[in-house]
Amino acid sequence: MNAVTIDGPAASGKSSVGYEAARRLDFLFFDTGILYRAVTWAVLQQGISVADSEAVGQVAEQTSIDITAPTRDHRDGRQVTVAIGDNDITWAVRTPHVDQNVSIVAANRLVRQALGEQQRSIGLRHGSGAGGKSGIVMVGRDIGTIVLPEAPLKIYLDAPVDERARRRQQELAARGKETDIARVLADMQQRDEVDSERAIAPLRPADDAHQIQTLGLSIPQVVDKIIALAQTHLEVGPATPLDQTAPRGGGAAPH
Ligand code: CDP
């Protein structure tokens, strides 16, 4: 199986690093956080309380989330286009309002059941090479522990919380959203706490995960470490060189 799992707390660099690693390995990139964010967006949009477990679970079961490659019209830094029906929610799922509510939604048993099964079948299909690409890079919180524990290469990215808050603030600023660093930090600490302490699929490194501390490392440096591990853990040929022109979604450091 050719599968790389990348887990870690908020803004530890999973998406930027995972996207670039997948590009170099020519694997499918799948950011599972998007699904939890999209369900949260739908819940908020329908005026449902995130505390109403049954209603939130129903939204997860009934909402069809489309994730597609961006077209030429979308040169705004997006990795993928996220849509529900006719609504392009690519950026709507990245607002502070969704950030503040997503962890409660993601702790919901019905939500995890509905989304977890879909993720596992996508991981198995693309990890076996049956999906057009020769492998998959899957990013999230519980991918190495619960969703795809048989993956031959598991990564856990981390960085101190104030560094991660700085990265998230930069990322928001790059999209024209000025935010208060203290607020970003507080929201992030709250989200990490809920993600780590929830009963089902809490955030933690798998026993056999390679832990990478990303403080002081650039995105290409972290990607290089993962590519080196991929050469020994997966059935891959030489990876394509780093594309210096590829968008990395913000600053020099992972976010
Ligand atoms: O980009 P960032 O790390 O801030 O967040 P994300 O990866 O988009 O995930 C958003 C939220 O979804 C997390 O805070 C978790 O509550 C939830 N999530 C999860 O529970 N399990 C996953 N596999 C991925 C995300």
Image (cartoon, rainbow, N blue to C red):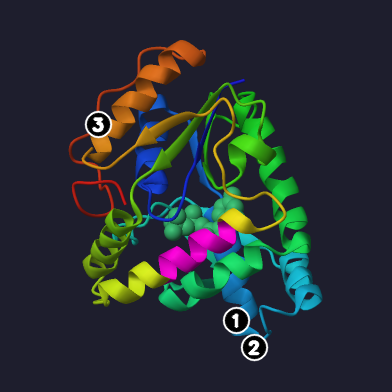
Residue in the image at 30% along x and 33% along y? 222
Can the viewer see residue 142?
yes
Residue 44, which numbered label? 1
Tell me the magenta residue range. 187-195
Crowd tier of the residue under label 2, counting other residues whose Cα lies within 10 Å: few below 14, some 14–19, many 20 or above: few
Residue in the image at 76% along x and 56% along y? 114
Closer to us: 101 or 119: 101
- Between the residue at mark 1 and the residue at mark 3, the CA separation in whole angstroms equals 38 Å
Residue 156, which numbered label? none
CB at disc 3 and ligand 1 closer than 8 Å: no
How many numbered markers are drawn?
3
x%, y% of residue 145?
Answer: 64, 37
Discs 2, 1 touching: Cβ within 8 Å: yes
Relative to 20, 206 lies left or right:
right
x%, y% of residue 89?
Answer: 49, 70
Q: Quadrant of the N terminus?
A: top right
- Which three-letter amino acid code belongs to the residue tagged 2? Gly
User: Which mark is in front, 2 or 3?
Assistant: 3
Residue in the image at 72% along x and 66% along y? 60
User: Which mark is in front, 1 or 3?
Assistant: 3
Tag 2 secondary structure: loop
120 in the magenta segment: no
The residue that label 3 is drawn on is: 221
The residue that label 2 is drawn on is: 47
Tag 3 secondary structure: helix
- Which three-letter amino acid code belongs to the residue tagged 3? Gln
- Which three-letter amino acid code belongs to the residue tagged 1? Leu
189 in the magenta segment: yes
